[in-house]
Image (cartoon, rainbow, N blue to C red):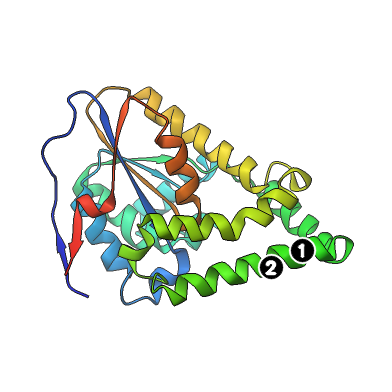
Amino acid sequence: MCMMLLGTMAGCSVGKNEVVVMGMIHGRHLTSDTYSVERVKEFIQAVDPDYVLCEIPPDRFDQASTEFNASGTIVESRVRRFPEYTHALFPLRASMKFEIVPCAAWTRTMANERRDKLQKFKTQRADDYAEMEAADKWSDQQLEKEGFGDDPMGIHTLRYDEITKKGLEPYNRLFNDAIGDGGWDNINRAHFALISAALDAHRNEGKRFLIMFGAGHKYWFLEKLRERKDIQLRSLKDFVSHD
């Protein structure tokens, strides 16, 4: 795949902030040829953001920053799981001068509760659990079948979002309320509240925001971002092209 970085484009609305959502594949960035850590770096440089809103809990961010500034590595348990941050975002911050804004609402307690409840549902609600697993399997297979997999251009399409949303629908419908704060709609609302707060704090400054979250969250965020009239929503493809 041949890619060309397009960089900043003219014609954005004066005063409105630009927002770009970039879906991440987390650990697979370390093994993917098409969506490698180096490719993530190239995309960040092409977008050239003023602010990066990322999937890091606010209470973990200071420790991760201190660790990186001291040694160039991050051992903080939540952040080190994401090579797009440890190998790309943090290393680029000094030279690019963007501000990182942590916007993940996850807590360790929330994650543990979700894990424990889903484990119980596996036997207590076996039919519901089987429906959730089947939809998840279908989604993974459909993404591979249509060639999206770890292709960054495929990931940033409406079709990818359609498949992802359909694959997550049973999980959300059957278990969101039962899981509680860590349920799919619930956690996305909490993530998006932090994202919205960051956008509100810089309303109409003519800045560019890059949102870097797991690709599964992308459709949910985009649906909410389209409701905002004070931003100009941009696609990653505005900045990156391929032949």
Amino acid on which disc 1 is placed:
Tyr
Disc 2, SS:
helix
Q: State the image coordinates of residue 44 (x, y, percent, origin top left).
A: 26, 53
Query: Residue 54, can we see it?
Result: yes
For residue 133, the mark is 2
Instruction: Give the CA separation, mark 1 to mark 2.
Output: 6 Å
Query: Residue 62, can we see it?
Result: no
The answer to whether the residues at label 1 and label 2 have Cβ atoms under 8 Å apart is yes
Q: Who's the residue at 25% across and 42% down the image?
A: 49
Judging depth in this view, the residue of 64 and 42 nearest the camera is 42
Q: State the image coordinates of residue 55 (x, y, percent, origin top left).
A: 47, 48
Q: State the image coordinates of residue 81 (x, y, percent, origin top left).
A: 50, 62
Judge the density around disc 1: few (<14), some (14-19), many (≥20) Cα neighbours within 10 Å.
many
Q: Who's the residue at 53% across and 40% down the image?
A: 191
Judging depth in this view, the residue of 233 and 196 nearest the camera is 233
Residue 164 to residue 93: above or below: below
Placement of the N terminus among the 4 image quadrants: bottom left
Q: Is residue 10 shown left or right of residue 37?
A: left
Q: Who's the residue at 68% across and 56% down the image?
A: 170
Residue 213 to residue 231: above or below: below
Amino acid on which disc 2 is placed:
Glu
Q: Which residue is mark 1?
A: 129
Furthest residue toward right: 124
Judging depth in this view, the residue of 22 and 83 nearest the camera is 22
Q: Is residue 188 shown left or right of residue 116?
A: left
